[in-house]
Amino acid sequence: MKNYIGILRNCTLFQGIEPENLTALLGCLGARVERFGRDESIFTEGDPSEELGILLSGSVQILRMDYDGNRSIVANVAPSQLFAEAFACARVPAIPVDVIASSDCEVMLINAVRITHSCSNACHFHNRIILNLLQSMAKKTLMITQKIEVTSKRSTREKLLTYLQLRARENGSLDFFIPFDRQELADYLEVDRSGLSAEISKLRKEGMLWCEKNHFRLLR
Amino acid sequence: MKNYIGILRNCTLFQGIEPENLTALLGCLGARVERFGRDESIFTEGDPSEELGILLSGSVQILRMDYDGNRSIVANVAPSQLFAEAFACARVPAIPVDVIASSDCEVMLINAVRITHSCSNACHFHNRIILNLLQSMAKKTLMITQKIEVTSKRSTREKLLTYLQLRARENGSLDFFIPFDRQELADYLEVDRSGLSAEISKLRKEGMLWCEKNHFRLLR
DNA sequence: CTCCATGCGTTGAAAATTCAACAGACTTTC
DNA sequence: GAAAGTCTGTTGAATTTTCAACGCATGGAG
């Protein structure tokens, strides 16, 4: 488990657990670490959904693919965040999304049942972990609600501005980076890429926005 | 608490709790019941989000209102289902949605902290309830993911068909009722009402669909 | 250095959505 | 039973989005 401790301490799942107990706890949960290369899939739609993941390094995206090839990015996962926990906890037989590595990454995988069912050695961290999981899932719901707030806007322009304003607020600064390139941003906002580019240009000309690659600044 | 027991037994939150213990448990949780008339708001955007709700009768909708008046229906709540639990568990200071009674209804309200923090009399149902809440929230995440599946489609036609197919599958029959009138369906699908009506007509003419008010049948 | 792949902005035409307005069917109210 | 109000389907015009295609810039591989 080497030096993952730093990342794991930031993970909501382990809030309130003393670092010196973490290694033992991970053993008790049967946690294991796997590596994935860019574009490799961590879970594929239809997979049994028994495990939840914690991103240790790199980045991961939750995707839905249309039968006719439209990609929709449901969420972007940053290091120390959980993913697929809802599917694992809901005990659905098959996971309804694709989870892919959007860069090389390391992932910790834990079987959800090991969390929800107390281990035989009655490890006393379990209650804490379950409450942490509860709170983490609640926050995830908020993130998805936020995505709905963005994508429910009717025009490309409003979707984009709503998204950028949320990002700015979250960053506490009008100057910030987003985790998407243009195509990915379009897939998150659920709009056409070329239309999105056009809208960005327009906002730039109007002096509302400065940007370079994935670095944005809202000007007024 | 009169005859709510029947509804509450169907509520995921109380799965595995014997009915004879339910009344005591509700007391321990500080549960209370309130009534709301049609279009009354149960929670308003910005309210402190400490309580979660269980719908006992009637129906409730989770809404987001745009600054320019666009309404988006995030979810529809049926009796015995939970609502606002994610906001209460995430401990956000303010609830980011409106929760309104879409018909006269009765609602049970419980302070989330009473669930997550064991009561002083160490009531042994608490662990069970927390696990139930976890699973319930996971299922809610699936519902929202489903909404994203629907609204991420690019055309009114595809959104409508995807929604109806999901409804049919959920009902186990191609003949089913939906909990929305036309305007509400449009607000859920995030499309224009008149365009939705036009699309329904078209599908009818093509022989793909039969419908009357909120009663639908998929024909092929 | 050159070649190739990729990301991004631009454009114009086709297609779809939105918007406002209206009419018919039904309900509710008085 | 009449009147007022609500819900739905229709229509046509204005606006947007989508789609396909192209060129330029950048960056990596050989």
Image (spheres, coloured by chain):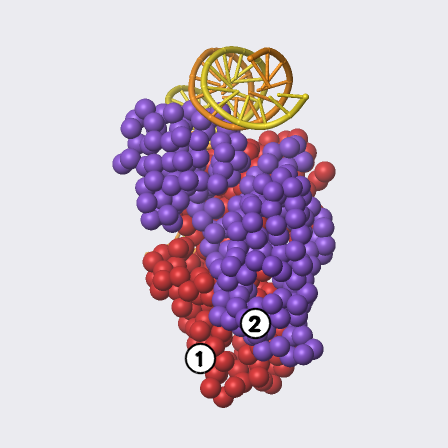
Chain colours: A red, B purple, C yellow, D orange
Q: Please tell me if label 2 and label 1 are on a single chain.
A: no
Q: Residue at x 34, y 28 (%)?
A: B203
Q: Which residue is mark 1?
A: A30
Q: Position of residue A114 (x, y in %)?
A: 46, 77
Quarter of the figure with the C terminus of chain B: top left
**Marks 2/1: CA distance?**
35 Å
User: Local crowd at mark 2 within 10 Å, few (<14), some, or many (≥20)?
Assistant: few
Q: Which residue is mark 2?
A: B21
Q: Is residue B208 left or right of residue A90?
A: left
Q: Residue at x 56, y 46 (%)?
A: B58
Amino acid type at circle 1 is Gly
Amino acid type at circle 2 is Asn
Q: Is residue B91 left or right of residue C3?
A: right
Looking at the image, which is closer to me, A210 or B85? Answer: B85
Residue A67 in view here: no
- Chain letter belonging to callout 2: B
Q: Is residue A106 left or right of residue D14?
A: left
Residue B177 has which mark? none
Looking at the image, which is closer to me, A178 or C20? Answer: C20
The image quadrant of residue D10 is top left
- Chain letter belonging to callout 1: A
**Dot in front, 2 or 1:** 2
